[in-house]
Image (spheres, rainbow, N blue to C red):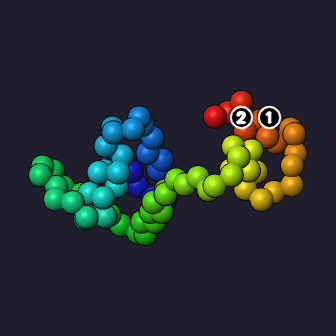
Amino acid sequence: MTGSGLVVVVGQVGSGKTTLLYSIMEETRVSEGSCRVTGTVAYVEQEPFIFSGTIKDNILFGLAYDENMLTTALQHS
């Protein structure tokens, strides 16, 4: 890929997304091939958590109750 752009890496759990990103950031040993990064790489690891409370509390996360928002969140999970 040349020029600037956004690359999104998606896949099932265990498919190698994190290993790929770690390899790009030179955090793992590359056993074959090569990797060259030009420009800036940003990576923010996701740390899922659930706090003590109801499912509704965990979805709203302190926001005011909005039935439409809660229904949408439940339908898309």
Residue 68 coordinates in the image, percent (x, y): 86, 38
Q: Is residue 64 left or right of residue 59?
A: right
Occupied quadrant, residue 12: top left
Against 49, is 11 above or below? above
Q: Is residue 66 left or right of residue 39?
A: right
Mark 1, secondary structure of its residue: helix
Q: In front: 50, or 68?
A: 50
Does residue 52 appear anywhere in the picture? yes
Residue assigned mark 2: 74
Residue 29 coordinates in the image, percent (x, y): 16, 59
Say what amino acid the circle numbered 2 marks: Leu
Say what amino acid the circle numbered 1 marks: Thr
Q: Which residue is pictured at 77% across the width and 35% down the height?
A: 72
Q: Quadrant of the C terminus?
A: top right
Q: Are marks 2 and 1 in contact (CB under 8 Å)?
A: yes
10 Å neighbourhood of mark 1: few (<14), some, or many (≥20)?
A: few
10 Å neighbourhood of mark 2: few (<14), some, or many (≥20)?
A: few
Q: In front: 67, or 37?
A: 67
Q: Which residue is pictured at 45% across the width and 60% down the height?
A: 45
| Cα separation between marks 2 and 1 | 5 Å
Residue 38 coordinates in the image, percent (x, y): 35, 66
Residue 40 coordinates in the image, percent (x, y): 43, 69
Q: In front: 75, or 22?
A: 75
Q: Which residue is pictured at 81% across the width and 57% down the height?
A: 63
Q: Which mark is residue 71?
A: 1
Q: In front: 23, or 71?
A: 71
